Image (tube, helix red, strand yellow):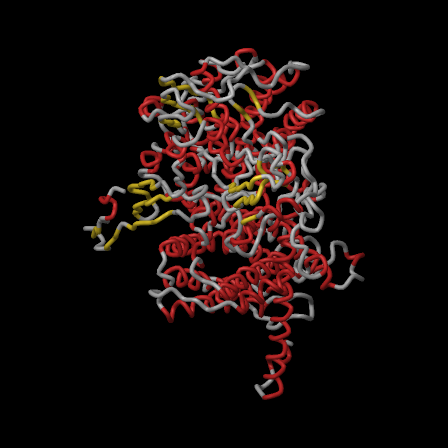
Amino acid sequence: MNQNILTTQVETSPDTGIRTEEMLLNVGPQHPSTHGVFRLVVKIDGETIREAIPVMGYLHRGTEKLAENLNYTQIIPYTDRMDYVSAMTNNYVLCHAVETMMGLEIPERAQFLRLIAMELNRVASHLVWWGTYLLDIGAMGPFLYAFRDREMILDLFNELCGARMTFNYMRVGGVKWDAPPGWIEKAKDFVQYMKKELPSYHQLVTGNEIFISRIKGIGKFDSKTALDYSLSGVMLRSTGIKWDIRKDEPYCIYDRFEFDVPTATEGDCMARYHLRMAEIEQSLRILEQALDQFPAEGEIIGKVPRVIRPPAGETYVRIESPRGEIGCYIASQGKDKPWRLKFRRPSFTNLQILPKLLEGENLANMIAILGSIDIVLGEVDC
Amino acid sequence: MLGLAKGLGYTFKKLTEKKITHFYPDVPFPMPPRFRGIQHFSPEKCIVCNQCARICPTECIQLTGKPHPDPDKKGKLIDTYDINFELCILCDLCTEVCPTEAIVMTNNFELAAYSRDELYKNLKWLDDNNTNVREEN
Amino acid sequence: MSTLLQQAPSLGNTIWFILAAVVLLAVLLGFVTYAIYFERKVIGWMQLRIGPNRVGPLGLLQTVADVTKLLLKEDTRPLHADKALFTLAPILAYAPAFAVLAVMPFTESIQFADLGIGLLYYIALSGITVLGVITAGWASNNKYSLIGGLRSAAQMISYEVPLVMSVVGIVLMTGSMNLREIVEAQRDVWNIVPQFIGFVVFIVAAQAELNRTPFDLPEAESELVAGYHVEYSGFRFAMFMLAEYVYMFGMGTLITILFLGGWLPIHPALSFIPGIIWFVLKFSLYVFFQFWLRATMPRMRVDQLMSFAWKVLLPVALFNILLTAVVISYQNGMF
């Protein structure tokens, strides 16, 4: 931690003679709105933030180091625990990296199952964000409505792979389970239900004048800053840069489906709110097409050698997680364990802009800005 | 003001809607067939191949074998088998690699205990945990 | 009751006074207990939950259990807190909340003191509570509670101005500050109709005075953890909670009296229903509205809150006074 923040300034106003002092406020690691164990040391002058320093690592479990002693199948359950709100994308990025190194062919049905799982997870993740963001802003109702709908997705996952959050669903070369009988129909029903439910979210929150005045125009940054901080996902798209890896570097079978990449130009919390809501719609659109085109039969796992040994070399793959660009770098020496494994975690990268955004802001905006970045602490600390 | 009124209308409508609360401890929570609960272990099926212990990402399985009492028969018999549920993440990999389905998942998931020691489950406990055993593994 | 006040003080009527106060306190505690219960139930229902249902039949004893727990808790005090002020603050917050109820006419007969300036008395006393809150914030020696205390001082003082201004219209119309006379003046039409602007301003300002959603900044859970009472626990915390809900009781009573016609029935034909029932009905409507708001609204931001009070509510309230004055002068044939 930067020690400079610990010195606070004492000033005496020349006009009134009133002595004022800056105050250090320790937000977290146990604080209702830091979404886990995130700590923020802020120096405030009244209610204006002069400086903010994020302190992270309270949830660091050394996933990357642990992975060096695990074989590739064993790492998959560890990735579930990084971004626990959207574990499917983490599963995928690791499998995708290994498959890329080994040049494996993935069967059609497995691709579809992966895509459906990832998109359902994206909807679930954005629902969690929506609920908790509103909770940060002070409305507690939306949280429960969002969790009711997310629960349906989790139930779907529970039927598909036997767990609600830590899926361990994907395997190198395919997926572990085929869709159980009737699952595709249930997923279709959910998509239709969610399409009907989404407008009521807007009815409840989006038009609310208090909510709009809380988040409009705060936490603003432009596209140059976004690129400088190498932001990705909604944080980047909210500044007008149309960059979605699903569209620009299609992986899995995203190139087969029609969907838009919503962008905004304002770059404020409001824009990010609208983008995430629009992304739920787009995800539902992808899901609708994917569920309709779901192949009637086929293999769910391709031809994979019994021991997974990627050839010596390095690879980096990236995909679009709900939070942004999640990447996986593997350096292999041809063994069954990676020599080095590195995850590019979007939450961690996006969080770096926080001190800049908080400077000069009102203390009450701190929570609104932090929430709009959409971090998952499991991923930040990894 | 319209937005506020709309929101109030929405919550008012919900007032009479059907509640979604589960009466969980009173009414058991049904889990789907594939649910990954606490493992069931059948010692008679085990061939002491040690694969489960090796695949376990958290190294929570400890097992020892003993030679077959009938000297004509090859192979080993399982002697002790412990799973440490302080570590186990119920990732399903042990049941996936088991060639004889000696270790399988069940639908039971209630693991809360007053002492950490109770989380060390031994062979007998895992053998007795034979309700709601998962069909496909 | 009123006749008692005019007698010479003696042991007999002193005991009566104390007894009556105890009865009121009991009623109040009953109200608080079940207000909290219904708050949790109503909000639960609105959020598709069922609310408390474990303690007692239908969860009716949930609040009793909670309060018992609070009272039995260890009394903790931060090491560097200002001992005297820390102890004083909850009392300072609670006492005026209870005292304002003395002038409230619940029906024609149930009233403790029939003060000529009942309305002024209410406003003057309720202003003291802010002292309790800011004392609590300062004495806790905690940064969060300090911010919460200062926020609430700024907020409650600012919102008192439009709150008072919004009722001036009623005082002009009635020509009295006596709460009983204000109710009696609503025989033909409730004040909510001619004083609708005043009513809206009053409801908003009352919400801010009560520190309830969407103006619950002083204890903004997601920002300040619990605001001014972050360091309080046990029975001191219970006092703050009690003060909050008693204030809700007081504000609900005041709104019923000022704008909803007190114990008067909707239509004279329905006057066979006792006044107290009408009063409780109208009062419950307001309390329900509180819970409803809490289930729906996000929180305002502190700077918006202040500018809203001074730039929107106060001008509107002043306009209402002007309008009322012009209309009354016109009716009196001054133009």
* The residue positioned farthest toward the left in the image shown: A14
In this picture, residue A149 sits left or right of residue B16:
left
* Residue ID at (66%, 40%): B107
Q: Residue C26 at x, y = what percent?
A: 63, 71
Q: Quadrant of the N terminus of chain C?
A: bottom right
* Residue ID at (60%, 61%): C249
Q: In which quarter of the image is residue A202?
A: top right
Q: Residue C158 at x, y = what percent?
A: 43, 52
In this picture, residue C142 sits left or right of residue C329:
left
Q: Is residue C283 visible?
A: yes
Q: Is residue A112 above or below residue C281?
A: above
Pick whichever, B119 or C14, lies toward us: B119
* Residue ID at (80%, 56%): C269
Q: Residue B53 at x, y = what percent?
A: 51, 36
Pick whichever, B12 or B56, lies toward us: B56
Q: In this view, does C227 lie above or below A108?
A: below
* The residue positioned farthest toward the front in the image shown: B72
Q: In this view, does C125 lie above or below B104?
A: below
* The residue positioned farthest toward the top in the image shown: A256
